[in-house]
Amino acid sequence: MKISSVISFLFLVLLRWGHHQSHIEGPSKMVLVPGNDEIESFYMDQYELTIAEFAEFVEATGYVTEAEKLGGTMRLKGGTNWEIIEGKAWNRHTLLDENGIEETLDKIPEFRNHPVMHLAPSDVQAYANWVNKRIPTLQEWMHAVKAGQKDYQYAYPGGNDLRKLGWYEGNTDSWFPMDVGTKMPNELGIYDLVGNAAEVVLLEKGSQEFQVRGGTFFSSKMFLEPERKAPIGAVWNRPLDMIGIRLVKDVQ
């Protein structure tokens, strides 16, 4: 464990407890992504869903995530064998337990505007059903990454300087993500399409065949390339620490 990371964690919990919450907190805004002759226009969440927003869903519905049912998220343990990383869920983190902190992430102001993570695609779908939205298709997600442009000139959504555009292992301490919307957006005003939390995309609209794209705050640079999918087994109800939520909605 990095000493500097622990010091930073204890500082934010003990000294910044009760600070006011970011102006971003609240229902995610949606941005119109213009279509073309190959894809219809649609709305996309401007920000990745926050812990605070997911907490509203849980409070209203009593929903229990797959990670909570298992007691943690899952990771590959060599070859095709999977193991559970205990203590991780959308509102829990192993570092909290190690420091004897009983409060959940959604009750600590410093974390409420972090992207919700440690989900399974089935959890993402459950939230989408609740808010009457849907998971984007891969085609829609890539179209949004390119700001609706066919011939996009940049390597990442919004430019080529990744440090200004997304949170990844090169500019975080690798323990926690950062508040949503704190890096530069793409040309449509959509934030964190790469980095912070990874996002589920469907291969076909309404299916359960999916990929995970965009990389995370703990990913290496190459996994933030929009064209690269996360190298995971595609299981609908398997919770992974990388998965967050960004949804779309059809234009009526």
Image (spheres, rainbow, N blue to C red):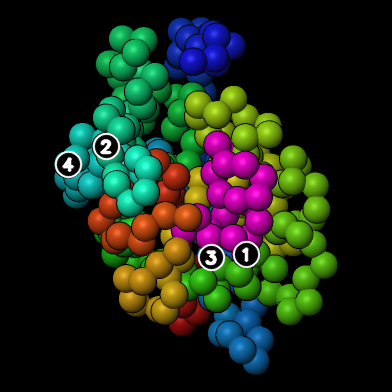
Write down the residue under mark 1.
Answer: 227
Tell me if 27 is positioned left or right of 8 in this view: left
The residue type indicated by label 1 comes to Glu
The residue type indicated by label 4 comes to Lys
* Residue 46 appears in the rendering: no
Whichever of callouts 1 and 4 sits on the residue coming sooner in the sequence is: 4
Write down the residue under mark 4.
Answer: 69
Return the mark for residue 44: 3
Q: Secondary structure at mark 1?
A: loop
Q: Secondary structure at mark 2?
A: strand
> Cβ–Cβ below 8 Å for labels 3 and 2?
no
Q: CA distance from mark 3 to mark 4?
A: 30 Å
Whichever of callouts 1 and 2 sits on the residue coming sooner in the sequence is: 2
* Residue 104 appears in the rendering: yes
Residue at 36% across, 71% down = 209
Which region is colored magenta?
212-230
**Considering depth in this image, is 71 or 92 the residue closer to the camera?**
71
> Cβ–Cβ below 8 Å for labels 1 and 2?
no
The crowd level at tag 2 (other Cα within 10 Å; few <14, some 14-19, many 20+) is some
